[in-house]
Image (cartoon, helix red, strand yellow):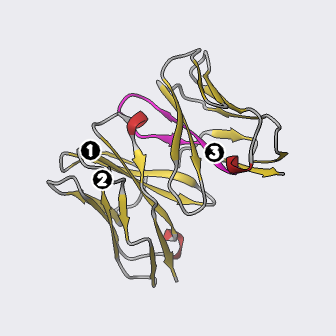
Amino acid sequence: GQQLNQSPQSMFIQEGEDVSMNCTSSSIFNTWLWYKQDPGEGPVLLIALYKAGELTSNGRLTAQFGITRKDSFLNISASIPSDVGIYFCAGQLETDKLIFGTGTRLQVFP
Amino acid sequence: KAGVTQTPRYLIKTRGQQVTLSCSPISGHRSVSWYQQTPGQGLQFLFEYFSETQRNKGNFPGRFSGRQFSNSRSEMNVSTLELGDSALYLCASSRDRGMSTEAFFGQGTRLTVV
């Protein structure tokens, strides 16, 4: 199936550190989304981006929609233990299906 | 406001059997999408239903099917189960089509095929 390239695959960081992850695609999208999934739960939407170049923040989270419309990144500042989980990017072209990234597993150590 | 409800949460089936999973969307949401999540393939789109009609379909064999009822509840069915069908099946609902930014996921049904 179709997937977006997401990196890194996993991260092990200390509490308080900043985190950066990104997603790239060979196709362009009109919407980029970032989700977090906790064990045993469905993904929860964190940030939505609607146009190229857009930079959006949600608390300690900041995400950007790449100028080429083929990439996006997510930054988490001053990580805390509850940031642990799997982060997914997803792209959508109009009413088409969501295409998800391969996920970044984040582990935060105190 | 109740969230997206998926039943059952866990299911164990044997190869060759069939299974039906249920998804009750958030009240007022008319679009329901289904995804399969596996460690190897990640989250893969199965299909989307809106107003009782399948509007979009992913690249899955015909053994995977679904339907939506007039109250927007949706079911998906997998026939002739294979070991590789073991996965977390997630559904997401939104008020309308293309409103992925307002789509909410259920907790999923974890299907194990033995």
Say the numbered circle drawn on residue B58.
Answer: none
The chain ID associated with circle 2 is B
When the figure is inspected, residue A93 is found, relative to residue B69, above or below; the finding is above
- Circles 2 and 1: CB distance less than 8 Å? yes
In percent of width and height, residue B12 lies at 46, 81
Which residue is disc 3 drawn over? A87
Q: Can residue A102 be seen in this view?
A: no
Q: Name the residue under label 1.
A: B29
Q: Nearer the viewer, residue A18 or A70?
A: A18
Helix, strand or loop at label 3? It is strand
A9 on left or right of A58: right
Q: Position of residue B60 (x, y in %)?
A: 42, 57
Tags 1 and 3 on a common chain = no
Task: Please tell me which residue lies in front, B33 or B1.
Answer: B1
Is B48 one of the magenta-colored residues?
no
Q: Give the range drawn in magenta.
A: A84-101
Q: Is residue A77 among what the camera can see?
A: yes
Amino acid type of the residue tagged 2 in the rendering: Pro
Residue picked out by circle 2: B25
Task: For mark 2, give the secondary structure.
Answer: loop
